Amino acid sequence: MMTTHSIEVSTVTPVHNEELCIEEFVRRTDAALSALQVPYEIIIVSDGSTDRTEALLRELAPRYPRLCVLMLSRNVGQCSAMYAGMQASRGRRIVVLDGDLQHAPESIGMLLRKMDEGYVLVSASRILRKESMMLKRIPSLIANFILRRVTGCEIRDMGGFKLIDGDIARSLRLRPGHHRLLPALVHMRGGATGEVFVESFARYAGHSHYGISRSFDVLFDILMLGFQSSFKARPLYLFGRIGVLLLTVDCIVMPWLLYEKFAHDVDLGTRPPFLVAIMFFLSALFFFAMGFVLELLSDANNAIGGIKPYIVRESIPTKPSSHL
């Protein structure tokens, strides 16, 4: 059902211990959105900050009426904090950006104009990045290349600065790590994704909270997304094909072993090929059983969460709008 929104643009920014950046971030974001002359809100989610970030946000709130602050009880990670901000948002469109000013709020207007061309999500792909080559840029290039090949989504920069349709964003059930995969997730549901190129700036102050170890987390996220993309979120397709492959090998090896047993009286029990064939047969049964179990769990999860595997781009005739 289509809805109307009193807020045109919501910005969602998860922060953790950003006391050196937060005042300048709020000032620049408010100025950038005010210049667009549309109704807006600025949502900042403090992800269990332990420095003066939350105290500064309390001081800023009276000065910026459109500032909304969520303070989480503990540090739950960037994705969960972003998800909390999305669910609290009211905007027709949601901008996701970091609080360290590596993403320039002044570029929001460019993303909005690109979305007007008919996109559900617009990515601000970074150029002229200032981060470390070895720790950030090379791992990011590799991860984005693999994601494009695995999912078919051609966005060059999957993480970071994004503009997404508000209703679509609020319908996503994000799991830890999914903040890096938003374009791929929307693409897999059939949403049109586009990109603009923006300059990436150095942090306004402070230091990054992420290191090279995050690359391993990204790899696991890509593997999971690859399974979902390749087999259309049907676990049985993946595990069933593995089981069929193992049974095929078994059906080739076992007749040969049985022929040698009865034709040439060759003992079966101590031969490695026989043991391998038995192992393959048992493994095939395991993969079939695993596929069925995961299929049932996937169906139950989708039913409980009300997840729809599609996005309606247009409806004819247009349904009447309902007001919030």
Image (cartoon, helix red, strand yellow):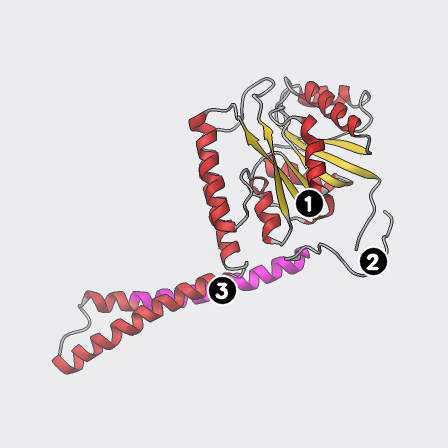
* 3D distance between C-alphas at marks 2 and 3: 37 Å
Q: Looking at the image, which residue is at 45% across and 34% down?
A: 139
Q: Which portion, as a residue range, is magenta?
A: 279-307
> Looking at the image, is mark 3 or mark 1 earlier in the sequence?
1
Is disc 3 placed on a helix, strand or loop? helix
What's under tag 3, amino acid-wise?
Answer: Leu
Which percent across, then down, holds residue 63? Answer: 81, 20
Asked if the magenta segment contains residue 131, the reply would be: no
In the picture shown, does residue 268 fall above or below 59?
below
> Looking at the image, is mark 2 or mark 1 earlier in the sequence?
1
Res. 235 mark: none
Q: Would you name the residue on which mark 1 appears? A: 169
In the picture shown, does residue 247 fall above or below 259?
above
Q: Would you name the residue on which mark 3 appears? A: 236
Q: Would you name the residue on which mark 2 appears? A: 319
- In this orientation, does residue 70 appear? no
Which percent across, then down, holds residue 165? Answer: 71, 44
Is disc 2 placed on a helix, strand or loop? loop
Frontmost of labels 3 and 1 is 1
* 3D distance between C-alphas at marks 2 and 1: 21 Å
Which percent across, then down, holds residue 313? Answer: 71, 54
The quadrant where residue 232 appears? bottom right
> Looking at the image, is mark 2 or mark 3 earlier in the sequence?
3
Asked if the magenta segment contains residue 280, the reply would be: yes
Frontmost of labels 2 and 1 is 2
